[in-house]
Image: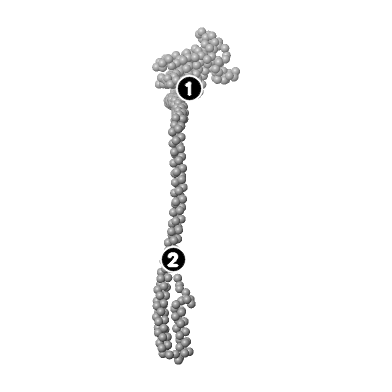
């Protein structure tokens, strides 16, 4: 803070007074010595007062500066106190609100406690009823879960049984497939051996075919018999003997001998033959005997059948067709007893 000098300032007054005396001394040069001394004394006194006042002014200026500094510091402290007061006021409001909430909560707890004491029995019954309902629901769900588990177990057992049956059937099919493949290979080998054994008889009306898993050795009448006869020629006996040698090496092959005739009615004086039926049967049994003579073929493997005229290979009513139909077939089939036993056992 700065000090502003005015007309009321003592220093100003002293200066003005000295100046005034100086003027008087100029105007009144003829003043007496006594008066001059008085004036001089008064001047010195005033000068002393002036110096005192100057020192006081400096002191007051310093004090004024210190007071200004202290005032600024106090203003800063006041602002800090105001901010602190504001924060404390907010905190107080917050605490008062929390107090009111706690007070209200405490009151509500007192009311709830009172209500609980008054209605304890009623609340207990309600809770027990709710608990019983919950237990019933849990029991129902447990029963349902147990039933579902039982059903799932039954389905699992059924599925396991079905899977076992499928696995067993698959194993059986694999075994059957293996056996059939072995049978097919055996029949292929048999056909090769029969074809090799009968090589050279093709021009005599002999054919060898393989179908439906069987081997068909078809021999025209001219290779085996004279027309209307059931006695085998030497050439025919030779062919049958060769077939017998091969069949001895394959004891698992069943042998079917079928006799076939044409549709011309039978007329002959060669034994008790009445018709084509008798002739076809007699020719079949003749071939059977030739196969069994001088061989180790088990007779249980051999079957003779007479087909007469009822299974022609060519239905045309021509000499050529009738010649084809007059034939004897040796049908070689694999013994499937093992396969049947396997199927029946697994069924």
The label nearer to you, 2 versus 1, is 2
* Residue 204 appears anywhere in the view: no
Q: Is residue 189 above or below residue 292?
A: below
In this view, the residue in front, 206 or 347, is 347
- Could you say where residue 149 lies in the image, as x and y percent from the top left? 44, 27
* Residue 34 appears anywhere in the view: yes
Residue 214 badge: 1
Counting other residues with Cα less than 10 Å from the Cα at mark 2, is it few (<14), some (14-19), or many (20 or more)?
few
The residue lying furthest to the top in this view is: 272
In this view, the residue in front, 164 or 3, is 3
In this view, the residue in front, 99 or 125, is 99
- Could you say where residue 137 lies in the image, as x and y percent from the top left? 47, 28
In this view, the residue in front, 218 or 127, is 127
Give the mark nearest the N terminus, 2 or 1: 2
Q: Give the image quarter of residue 31.
A: bottom left
On the picture, is 264 further left or further right than 290?
right
Task: Name the quarter where the N terminus is drawn.
Answer: bottom left
Q: Residue at x 50, y 20 (%)?
A: 218
On the picture, is 283 further left or further right than 66?
right
Q: Is residue 183 above or below residue 37?
A: above
- Could you say where residue 313 lies in the image, as x and y percent from the top left? 55, 20
Task: Name the quarter where the C terminus is drawn.
Answer: top left
Q: Is residue 29 above or below residue 338?
A: below
Q: Residue at x 40, y 21 (%)?
A: 249
Q: Which secondary structure lies at badge 1? A: strand
Q: Which secondary structure lies at badge 2? A: helix
Residue 72 badge: 2
- Could you say where residue 232 lies in the image, as x and y percent from the top left? 48, 15
């Amino acid at each position: 803070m700065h000090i502003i000098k005015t007309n009321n300032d003592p220093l100003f007054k002293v200066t003005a007074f000295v100046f005034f005396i100086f003027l008087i001394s100029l105007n009144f040069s003829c003043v007496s010595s006594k008066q001059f001394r008085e004036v001089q004394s008064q001047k010195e006194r005033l000068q002393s007062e002036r110096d005192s006042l100057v020192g006081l002014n400096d002191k007051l200026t310093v004090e004024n500066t210190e007071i200004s500094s202290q005032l600024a510091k106090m203003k800063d402290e006041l602002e800090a106190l105001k901010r602190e007061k504001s924060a404390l006021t907010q905190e107080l409001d917050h605490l008062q609100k929390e107090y009111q909430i706690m007070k209200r909560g405490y009151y509500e707890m007192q009311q709830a406690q009172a209500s609980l004491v008054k209605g304890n029995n009623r609340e207990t019954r309600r809770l027990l009823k709710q608990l019983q309902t919950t237990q019933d629901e849990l029991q129902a769900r447990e029963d349902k879960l147990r039933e579902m588990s039982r059903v799932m177990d039954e389905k699992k057992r059924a599925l396991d049984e079905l899977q076992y049956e499928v696995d067993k059937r698959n194993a059986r099919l694999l075994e059957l497939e293996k056996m059939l493949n072995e049978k097919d290979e055996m029949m292929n080998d048999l056909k090769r051996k029969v074809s090799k054994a009968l090589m050279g008889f093709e021009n005599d009306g002999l054919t060898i075919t393989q179908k439906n898993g069987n081997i068909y050795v078809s021999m025209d009448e001219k290779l085996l018999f004279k027309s209307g006869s059931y006695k085998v020629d030497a050439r025919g006996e030779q062919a049958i003997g060769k077939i017998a040698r091969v069949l001895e090496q394959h004891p698992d092959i069943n042998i079917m001998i079928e006799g076939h005739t044409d549709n011309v009615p039978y007329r002959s004086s060669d034994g008790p033959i009445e018709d084509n039926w008798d002739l076809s049967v007699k020719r079949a049994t003749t071939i059977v005997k030739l196969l069994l003579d001088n061989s180790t073929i088990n007779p249980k493997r051999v079957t003779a059948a007479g087909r007469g005229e009822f299974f022609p290979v060519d239905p045309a009513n021509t000499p050529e067709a009738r010649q084809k139909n007059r034939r004897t077939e040796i049908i070689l089939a694999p013994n499937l007893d093992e396969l049947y036993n396997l199927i029946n056992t697994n069924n």
